[in-house]
Image (cartoon, rainbow, N blue to C red):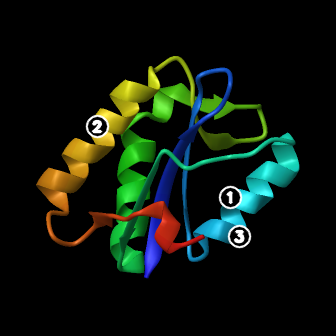
Amino acid sequence: MYYFYLWTNHLGRTCFGITGNPEGRRRKYEGHCGHAVKFERLYEGRQTLIEDLEDSIKSEFYEHLLDTGAGKYEWILDVPSEQVLGWVEWEINNSYANLIAPIDQSDVD
């Protein structure tokens, strides 16, 4: 299985990404930002579908992705996290029904 995750930092910026190891990925964020991180949403599915979902969110929010001049990153600026979460849920329910599913995060701790 592969995983798609979302979390919001203390500035209200939504981060998203994909991983084969959600616990390891979460711990790397903690090491970089110096505080506990909890994924607000975590979904699982086949790797190709999870990658497609990530491409879709990048396309939908392209103009809002963090751009440092060296490239764009998977941080969505200037869009409320509730709006991003709602878009992802709609996309999963309508484009990936029964193919990508939310999971209980205690299953991967």
Placement of 13 over or under 94, stated as above or below: above
**Disc 3 residue type?**
Gly
Q: CA distance from mark 2 to mark 1?
A: 22 Å
Residue 49: horizontal and vertical position, in percent?
A: 33, 71
Point out the tag, 2 or 1, that comes first from the N-terminus: 1
Q: Residues within 10 Å of mark 2 (few under 14, many from 20)?
A: some
Residue 106: horizontal and vertical position, in percent?
A: 50, 66
> What residue would you read off at disc 2?
87
Residue 5: horizontal and vertical position, in percent?
A: 50, 55
Q: Secondary structure at mark 2?
A: helix
**Disc 1 residue type?**
Arg
> What residue would you read off at disc 1?
26
Q: CA distance from mark 3 to mark 1?
A: 5 Å
Is 42 on the left-hand or right-hand side of 91? right
Please tell me which residue is depicted at 32% across the width and 44% down the height of the picture.
88
> What residue would you read off at disc 3?
24
Q: Secondary structure at mark 3?
A: helix
Q: Are marks 3 and 1 in contact (CB under 8 Å)?
A: yes
Looking at the image, is mark 2 or mark 1 nearer the viewer?
1
Please tell me which residue is depicted at 55% across the width and 42% down the height of the picture.
7
Residue 41: horizontal and vertical position, in percent?
A: 43, 50
Which part of the image, by quadrant, shows the N terminus?
Answer: bottom left
Q: Secondary structure at mark 1?
A: helix
